[in-house]
Amino acid sequence: MIVELGHYALILALSVSLVQSVAPLIGARIGDKRLMDIGPVTASAGFLLLAFSFSALTAAYVTSDFSVLNVFENSHSLKPMIFKISGVWGNHEGSMLLWVLILAFFGALVATFGRDLPPSLKANVLAVQAWVLTAFLAFILLTSNPFTRIFPVPFEGQDLNPILQDIGLAIHPPLLYLGYVGFSIAFSFAVAALIDGRIDAAWARWVRPWTLAAWICLTLGIAMGSYWAYYELGWGGWWFWDPVENASFMPWLSGTALLHSALVMEKRSALKVWTILLAILTFSLSLLGTFLVRSGVLTSVHAFATDPTRGVFILAILCIFIGGSLALFAFRASALESGGLFQPVSREGALVLNNLFLTTAAATVLVGTLYPLVLEMATGAKISVGAPFFNLTFGPLMLPLLFAVPFGPLLAWKRGDLAGATQRLYWAIGAALGGAIIVLALTRGTEILAAFGVALAVWLMVGSFADLGQRAGFRKAGLATGFKRLKGLPRSAFGTTLAHFGLGVTVLGIVCVSAFQTEVVTAMSPGETRESGGYSVRFDCMSERQGPNYTEEVGNFTLLRDGTSVDTMESARRLYTARQMPTTEAGIRTEWFSQLYISLGDSEANGGATVVRIWYKPLVTFIWIGAIFMALGGCVSLADRRLRVGAPGRRRAPTAVGAKAAGA
Amino acid sequence: MTRKGKRLSFIGGILAVIGLAAGLVLTALSDSVAYFNSPTDIVSKTPSPGQRIRLGGMVEDGSVIRGGRETITFRVTDTVESVPVTYTGILPDLFREGQGVVAEGTLGPDHVFLADTVLAKHDENYMPKEVVDDLKARGLWDHDKSAPKAATPEAAMTGVGS
């Protein structure tokens, strides 16, 4: 019964969304307030209906109702509860339902928190948001209904793909979707502004918090996915340039560019047209990502099922939205006047540089991801574009950008002083040189590239604090006054510093792992030892263990230093009984920021010996810690007073701005 | 700087970066992409040494030898021809005889394929898409069973979603 109600709620949500697509738009056109007011009501109602629908599916999973095809195909009564719940979005239908739920959630947020928005802008935004929602709801109902029943009812489910039975799945897709789908707000604002033919600095102030929130979630989602792949697949790699990873990375790159260009627009009302375009492109890339992952044109762990009608349907959605919004842009962009002149060397100039490199880099990733598909369609030749391609294209494009990052915040708006900025970066230059010298000394001059990489990372990390140091004026005013001034600085300054610092931390992790990791692949018999990361790793024995829905063979290892045992490690191979599918559970030991990583291979036909792969990965965790810093920086910025426009309560100054913009 | 000069320097800078990116992409596309080959392709037209290749097919039954401890040799077949492959390292969890596999690497002078990566993906039903397409194109695909025609009974039983 609850399943049918969920299905019914989904259909109701579609009709509500259809109303929301049309009524507020007409209202905004003819200036009818009652029609415009339908927008917020339908947005909230749509969200509640979808939340109910999603809960209904979750209930079916929790109670292991195998009369629902989707539950039968992806669940098992013996599965631990957390994976029963996360299994709801561990399949195509359920994850699409999560997608629209989050889309409706953002729509409802705009409806609730956007009280200060000019009414016509708000009506248009909600209508555009509803177009996207309608398209995807139709997609779900027509091609991927999660509520389909089967008869006769099976006794047991087929279980979830074991690789997805991990706490990572509980967190990774929702975060990623919050990011992907969150960019829809920026998109809706951009299209609404184009429909209105009017855009001002206040527009950027409204868009920026939404973009920032989406960006934070996407950053964490990508980092989470990367760490999940790292420990779950047992290959020891943290990024594979897999098309599906690229699908989430491209919106991140252009979303990062959007954050920075919206800043220029907000502060200087320049780059308006470009910011609008970027907002459209960022969400287009999110849609493209959804298409690549959901259509089955790619085979990967993320492509749950392949069904050509789905691919065609999403492709149609993709073409209509990207094509339509770009066409609208082409027609209306000239109506937007541009403002704010600036010199090439200035804050604006630095942010343009940032945008230029980020979007170009996103374009190269796009080429590398789509080229094999296009080539196959055109000539039938099958190629794979892998890490070598991306290292050769993406890498060189990032270098100048990373080098320029510390300069950006130190340059003044309109006209900057490069020599002055360099002077304030003496500390960072010294630290970077020091880092390089230490690396060269430790490796006796053999690792020149690594020294360069470490210098770049240190330059970023130390250089990101130059702006705060400068604004606090430690040098002239002394420590006490400096700290007092530091307290008075806007939070966004700390946000920038944290995010740029995090970028440096990530770069340091990447450089250290690529340059200094060691790998041993070897067959080991019980009692044998191998050296790795300053330890002797002794293989003790293999043992067997029974889990709730799997059996595992566990390799037991002891770590020795100077002959005394320090710790023990386990690395296992699991066999999930329902699907007869093996997985690797790597043994990972974190020491400070470095990790020792052991994965097991075959043990048959080796006379009792087991193939073992041992990595020592120095500072590998910096890669993800850096991402956490970036997200933290985003959160701090989000808490900045200036960005809290539209939040309920605390609205003395913002209302004035909103009213002025509404009256303009 | 005059307004015109400023605009020119902006446009020049933008074009320079885009040009650089295009150059990088073109070089990388000609050097560092791997072409998919079936065993028949490799036997009929020997690729030049050092060229990166993705070799796809099924692991031939009874061909897997775990000889020198961590080095493994096996043969990849498309039911017409087969190519010997050596690989050092840990094979993926789903590497099995009679199952689909993609090996990436280069062909050695002795016509033994030196793989540096072996992929057998995350799903028990998984047959690399490029292998399926290739077999279908050459009529080696059994549409009734959705499996390669000469495949082993076990492989046919697991059923390959096409």
Image (cartoon, coloured by chain):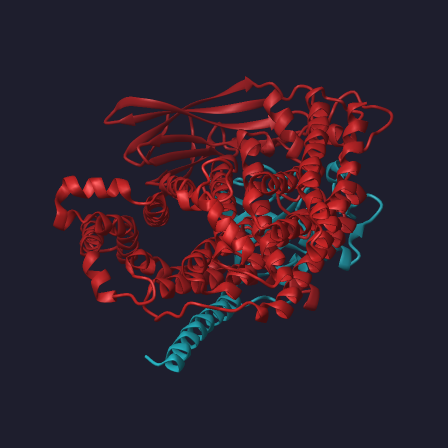
Chain colours: A red, B cyan
Q: Position of residue A511 (x, y in %)?
A: 34, 50
The image quadrant that residue B16 belongs to is: bottom left
Q: Relative to A571, say whether A325 is above or below.
A: below
The quarter in which the C terminus of chain A is drawn is: bottom right
Q: Position of residue A241 (x, y in %)?
A: 51, 52
Q: Residue furthest right?
A: A152
The image quadrant that residue B135 belongs to is: bottom right
Residue A156 visible, this orientation: yes
> Is A422 displayed left or right of B90 in the figure?
left
Q: Nearer the viewer, residue A14 or A566?
A: A14
> Is A427 displayed left or right of A301 in the figure?
left
Q: Residue at x 49, y 69 (%)?
A: A338
> Is A156 displayed left or right of B23 in the figure?
right
Q: Relative to A264, say whether A536 is above or below.
A: above
Q: Position of residue B86 (x, y in %)?
A: 53, 49
Q: Residue at x 27, y 35 (%)?
A: A534
How many numbered discs? 0
Residue B160 visible, this orientation: no
The quarter in which the N terminus of chain A is drawn is: top right
